[in-house]
Image (tube, rainbow, N blue to C red):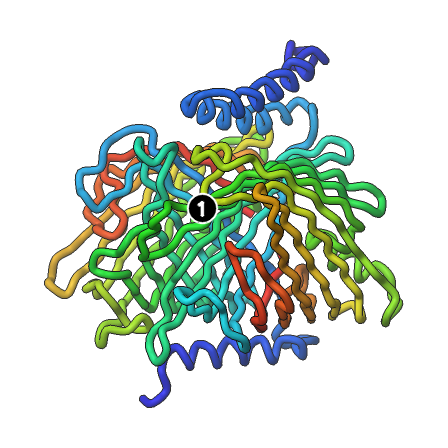
Amino acid sequence: MSISMKRLNMILLVGLLGLAPGLRGEGPKLVMSTQGYMLFAPHIHGRAKTSSSNAGYRMELLGLSDIVRWNRIYASFLTANKTLIARSESAGFFKLDQLKYTLSPDIRIEFDSWLMRASYVHESLHTVSRSSEGSSVWMNSYQVSVGSKGSNYLFLWEEFENNRNRFLNHIDALLLVAVYRSGRESIWVAKNHDYTHKIGSRLRFQVGSFNRWAFFIGSDLTAWHRETDDWEGTGIIRFNAFRKGVKNLGGFYYRYNFYDSYRPDNEEYLGSLGFQVIF
Amino acid sequence: MSYLDIPRYKEATLILILKTLLLIHKGTDRIKRCSCWLVIGCLLAGSTHSLAQVSLKAHGWITLESYVHGQADEPDLNRSHRSEFTGIVDLYSWKPFTFTLLLGTNTDVGRIPNSNYFMDRITYSLTYGVRADLDRMVIRGDYHHDCIHLINRPEIAGSTWWNAYLVRVGSRGAFNLYLPKEYNSKKDGLWKRWDGRVGAAYYLEAGATLRDGNNHIFKYQFSNLLRYRIFAQPKYIAFADLDQQFWYNRDESTEYKGSLTLNFLVKGESQYAGLFYEYHYYDTFVKDREDGLGAIGFRILF
């Protein structure tokens, strides 16, 4: 195949944007709607076991921009930025340590009570303010996820707004499978990692909605398969209390990593208390 | 009636918030951390009893741009692309006043000739402030923190950061939050509108602590934006910006950054996105010099 993935992605994106102004009537419609979240979370207890971790704080910005909609199908673009901040006595309050960028063209199909997403995910991990040992990590993968609407942040506000002042007592779930590209050392294929597959799941127990507050508990399990046939994994549990705004949610969560062997961002046995706005 | 409904509760909450904000500025790191959580908690919880309204509305912009002509002066920065993600959360509203929190990142991407791209530098912005939305004007007062970090490179003199008190006043159309709504409020087409805003900032003197700053000598900044609407249709808007910033430093030197931008935005079902061309006609700002550089980019307003 002579055309590179990078060029193909750019052509697809530019094609979508070029067509977009003409999208009217019964066919595809231009949406230009952005949803996402912002969060800041200090680690409040626990100590990471591995030397690769950056115990301190995490900050994340994520935006999913829906560009075009055709019936139940959305063509979107995701941009995200996660900062791993280490607590440092010598450098003052904190020290920015690593950065993770994510860029991803994304197709989403929404059904009545569940949704499916397929995306090409470009991720990179970099050190901040110091020389990189072993250089930056670049990953590219094809991802597919299937889940109920309530398992996705896009529909959380709607879910709790439609169910006021009562216990919800139901479970939402999501399953994700990713295949990493491997081959020559390139930032558009793979660089400095040996992951081949990822399998992830999410279970979310919707507790209820009372007096403008929404409560839910989530658990995420993710496993990565490496070329050496080893596995790495993370297990997280999260308790959430969110205040409903006019159209968004904002609130607190407590998150605990009860198992973590994932090397690029290891938070094993760390508990964090975060503030998050979902827009 | 519960004790939470009596007016004294409102007064007490306001006093608590003000005292806590004072502690943030004067206290130790531990007090600051606790205070931040306390303020956020009070703001969210207090609204249940109608002290004011919790809005939690988020707006902002995502920008991806590519430099298409010109050459950066800095020898260690081969500018290629720039991306920006800025989110502003309206936390709390009381009459025309809205308390906001801004979180933003700005990444400079470099490129080694005939080789791959590399992430070169990131700038974080963290701002809390108050916005007053008047009939035709907007007034903003912010406490603004910026920090600049090199990626994959050591910082010999340490990171750069600054903190400033910032005030901006302008017409609604000069603020991104109101721009699309304002520009489509009338169905006149062409050449009929100017918008503008002015701003002034005072920088805390750099003393290598998180609260004041590091590696900068800025004292004051003055800025203005002049925006001219070229046309506005229900589905499209086009406008031109003249953006100027002027710094007065503690050693009495000055710096200047000026740019011209042409914007074309398309309206979707709810929000706007589109293309822009930006040219930096003159730039002596040492921390982010783009003198003579021109860029084409894609911007989403949300």
Q: Nearer the viewer, residue A57 or B165?
A: B165
Local SS, label 1? strand
The answer to whether residue A245 shows anywhere in this view is no
Q: How many marks?
A: 1
Q: Toward which corner of the image does residue B185 lie, by quadrant?
A: bottom right
Q: Toward which corner of the image does residue B45 lie, by quadrant?
A: top right
Quadrant where the N terminus of chain B lies? top right
Q: Nearer the viewer, residue A159 or B234?
A: B234
Residue labelled with disc 1: B160
Q: Nearer the viewer, residue B139 or A81?
A: B139
Q: Could you tell me residue B262's position as x and y percent?
A: 69, 70
Q: Could you tell me residue A105's position as x and y percent?
A: 45, 68
Kind of residue at badge 1 = Thr
Looking at the image, residue B195 lies above or below residue B37: below
Q: Classify mark 1: residues with Cα within 10 Å, few (<14), some (14-19) or many (20+).
A: some
User: Which residue is pictured at 63% across the width and 77% down the height?
Assistant: A27
